[in-house]
Amino acid sequence: MLDGIMIGLNTAIMPFNLMMVFAGCFVGTFIGMLPGLGPVSAVALMIPITYGLDPSSGIILMAGVYYGAIFGGSTSSILINAPGCSSTVVTAFDGYPLACQGQAGKALALAAWCSFTGGTVGAIILLFAAPALATVSMSFQSSDYFALMVLGLTAVAAFAGKGQVLKSLIMAVLGLMLATVGTDVTSGTTRFTFGSSDLIDGVSFLLLAMATFALTEVIMTVLRGEHVKPQAEIDMSKLGSMRLSREEVKEVAPTVARSSVFGFLIGVLPGAGATIASFMAYGMERNLASVKEKLKFGKGSLRGLAAPETANNAASTGSFVPLLTLGIPGSGTTAIMLGALIAYGIQPGPRLFIDNPDVFWSVIISMYFGNLVLLVLNLPLIPYISRLLVIPNPILIPLILFFSVTGVYLVSFNTFDIHMMVVVTVISIVLKLLAFPMAPMLLGYILGELLENNLSRALMISDGSLSFLWERPLSAGIMVVAILALLSPLVTTLRNRRAAKEPQVAGAEESAA
Amino acid sequence: MTLRRDHVGGLLFLLLSVLYGWFIQDIALLPGDDLEPFHARTLPTALAWIGGVLSVLLIVTAGPVSVRPENDGRWYIGLTAGLLLLVVVFGLVLKWLGFLVATILFLAGGFWLLGERRPRMIAAVAIPFSVILWLLLTQALGVYLAPGKLVTAVLGG
């Protein structure tokens, strides 16, 4: 493992890669601050750039952007009560009241420190957990992989929130269907191409990700009329002190410790990302608080701000565990990173840290750097970065549109792709208006080929019988978890019907979805 | 019974699953494939069935949400269509006028559509941005951007 850390350090410390961490965090913070654009969109916008880099640098850049975007989301949550992404919705609960009380500086500093701690603790656990898990997963067979992927797809649905379970599953199936378009790898026959040569290679992953996340998000803000809403004025003179007193540090320390570990564990679960971790950590902290402290939640409680901020960063780190060790992305963002890795010809999974130790370890090491950069560089720069938010929407929106379109064009140099993007965008706008979530579709699309290969191998070995699903204890165990994950929303719905739930909590859960 | 949001979604996916299932028969099989436990049609067939069942479930369990999506303002359908059309036009123009001119036109069109009507302001952002990006791509990064067909026709290739 020490060798690995050294390889990782050597790769991560290369000036170019350090620059990528800086650039990633910086760009990520900016994109994350823009309302409506979250980590998924930010990482999607980076794909075309990473195609020109070598794998480690590319993934380091993406990881930096991921962190930065979450951090940027917190900033706009605190300053203007407009969360840039879903994982920082909770941050606004207590962060914005703090800003209203003239303590924006303190809230920002606390958010930055919490993100840093959460991320660092997460990275340390990742350092030990990932290689261990990777070793275990060496013994995985195709039936286990198949079961794991089924678990990944059902878990997304299980965590999707009220009334979204079926829709998430449908979107995952749609993603799998899209993945079957093109040439079948095992037999070489074309499927669903309708004779078009543009479809023989299948639907481009980059195109799908950019169209559904970058382009659609921007177009949706226009469709909803958010571009004409008055842009928030941020009064930087009212930031207040950025210092935390010793008592305040003492107050939040246990919260930060709890939320780091908790957030990481939630992040490891496939399908549950930073959003769920932040909501659950907030809920847990409120339950643990004394009656007197409970009243402060939602009115500017430091603990209420610390818990979700710590948890969402720890969870983002945690979501790298299944990606790096099993090759199964746990969230929309890591799904995009998986797609980028596959485009490099790198197969993430148990063999990653044997075949490409530099990629594996440098990602982990650069996570520390990323967290450091956020704290040292971004925090003092926040007043300046938020100035960029003042770019008027009529200028900003066409620029983002342009970047998402040319991002695809500059990789394929095929104008067919630009028109295809418009088609995909129109479809996803309709789906979004019908309240279908997009992330499961991308997850299904990316897992599609792997799932088919493993299913095919498992079925060949068992001579066509589905018994492989329960004959190996490991596969059977994973399948049981998958089925439980699928049934859990059903159970909660039934339980909720019986006992009238606290309306506030239900409301919070809905906004998370 | 009124049409609910999930009815529309469910019906759409039911239709999709049926169409998807229908086109499975176009997938050519290798000789002897029908004796194999797994071939090119296996997964699509399973997906078509799962998709169909899930859509029916969605229709049956549709929540009481009306098909009209909520929004706390008016919908900007015309503007949205305009922007999407602009992207389509960009794709067409790109082939004929080349990257630089197409980018300037796209950005200017976008600014104008979104309400920035001062010609000087439009030009002051669109032209330098496009020129710098074009220089960066072609000169610094060495990306080959094909000149537009019209440009080569007039100036000669």
Image (cartoon, coloured by chain):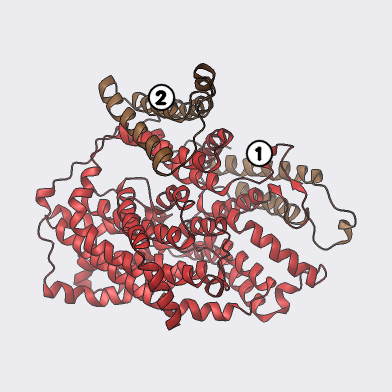
Chain colours: A red, B brown
Residue at the spot x=55%, y=57% of the render?
A: A344
Quarter of the image with the N terminus of chain A is bottom left
Q: Position of residue B90 (x, y in %)?
A: 48, 28
Residue A494 point in image, percent of width and height: 52, 63
**Chain letter of disc 2 in the image:** B
Q: Amino acid at mark 1?
A: Asp
In the image, residue A32 above or below residue A389 = below
Label 1 sits on residue: A198
Side (left or right) of A99 relative to A342: left
Residue at mark 2 to residue at mark 1: CA–CA distance:
27 Å
Give x and y (percent) for residue A102.
11, 55
- Horizontally, is B19 left or right of A170 in the view? right
**Judging from the image, what secondary structure is the residue with disc 1 in?**
helix
Observer able to see residue A87: no
Answer with left or right where residue A175 lies relative to residue A13. Answer: right
Q: Which residue is depicted at the point 54% across and 59% down?
A: A157
Q: Which residue occupies 25% across, 50% down?
A: A81
Q: Which residue is mark 2?
A: B105
Q: Which mark is residue A376?
A: none
Label 2 crowd (10 A; few <14 / some 14-19 / many >=20):
many
